[in-house]
Image (cartoon, helix red, strand yellow):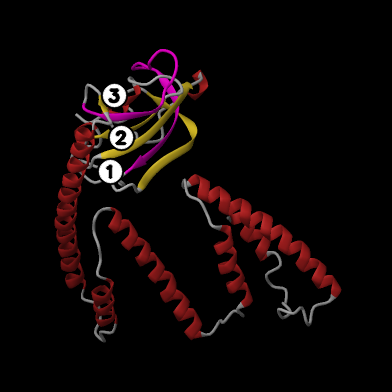
Amino acid sequence: MKKVIFILAAVALMASCNKKGEGCTPMEDSLSNVYGTLAGYGIKQQVTSDMQMNNESVNFEEFLKGLEKAIATEADTSLNARSFEMGEQIGKQISNGFAAMKEQGVNINKDVFIAELKKAFSEKKAVDQNKMMNLQMSLQALMGKVQAQAAKQKAKEGEKYYQEAEKSGKYKKTAMGVLYKVEKQGKGAKFKKGDNVMLKYKGMHVDGKVFDHAQQAVPFPVDETQIIKGFVDMLVNMNPGMKVTCIIPAKVAYGDAGNQNIMPGETLVFEIETVGMAPAEKAAPAPAPAPAAQK
């Protein structure tokens, strides 16, 4: 967003009139008109770009509500205002951290957290560095135990989900045990190992929550050293234009290691739609799901 910030900063030192436009000259109104249009285009372009890079979407209506509220409020540069803003920024960072921890199965009791934070923050004596180190080690140990418990529970949920799907009779099974249901038939020969396939996909936890997706077709190598074994096993059972919903057990997914978004022992659900073979210039390693092959 550097370009947008530069544009905004170029006129940031100019005095502003009130919300009704009182105190502004016709020339300043014209400047405000051009500035608002330019800022609108620039911010929308940057926000859209940032969201696409992170495979996210933005609610522009809510974004504009927040932006308008901030602009309508006169800037307060007092010590109290700066202190509040600093606390708010750090609070948002902590809240984002909570969200990331929740993805790994760790839930934080916010009431307990805030009570202890206030107590520690309000101590008059200097911070004891040895105590800090001991607390960090305790935190790591507790985090490991909680994550292990969460992973065990998630693995059980996945196994149950897989078993129920298998018993339903709605799914076929590949050689490696991947369950799949054909949503749309394809045409032509099935893909084989070594091919590079263009496909769209959506990766989900068994609760339906999406952890990764590609809405536009991207190239995937049918190669177990590039993508998880279960995904390869599914692709060699597909042909161009075919769409499936498949359930990949942990042993041919991310195994006991997991990754940033996947817990150890987790069963995964994918919606996969193949388009066809990737052009030679697009035959590059897939962006995801692409860990080293599980051994």
Q: Amino acid at mark 2?
A: Pro
Residues marked 2 and 1 touching at CB (< 8 Å): yes
Circle 1 sits on which residue? 259
Apparent side of residue 215 relative to residue 71 in the rendered image (left or right): left
User: Which of 272/184 is in front?
Assistant: 184
Q: Is residue 80 above or below residue 266?
A: below
Circle 2 sits on which residue? 291
Circle 3 sits on which residue? 233
Q: Is residue 186 magenta?
A: yes
Q: Amino acid at mark 3?
A: Asp
Q: Is residue 207 above or below residue 77?
A: above
Upstream in sequence: badge 1 or badge 3: 3
Q: CA distance from mark 2 to mark 1?
A: 8 Å
Q: Is residue 95 magenta?
A: no
Q: Amino acid at mark 1?
A: Asn
Q: Which residues are magenta?
A: 177-204
Apparent side of residue 165 relative to residue 68 in the rendered image (left or right): left
Task: Check disc 2: other Cα within 10 Å, few if <14, some if 14-19, many if 20+.
Answer: some
Q: Is residue 156 above or below residue 233?
A: below
Measuring 43% from the left and 29% from the top, which residue is drawn there?
273
> Disc number at residue 277?
none
* Quarter occupied by the N terminus: bottom right
Report which quarter residue 253 is drawn in: top left
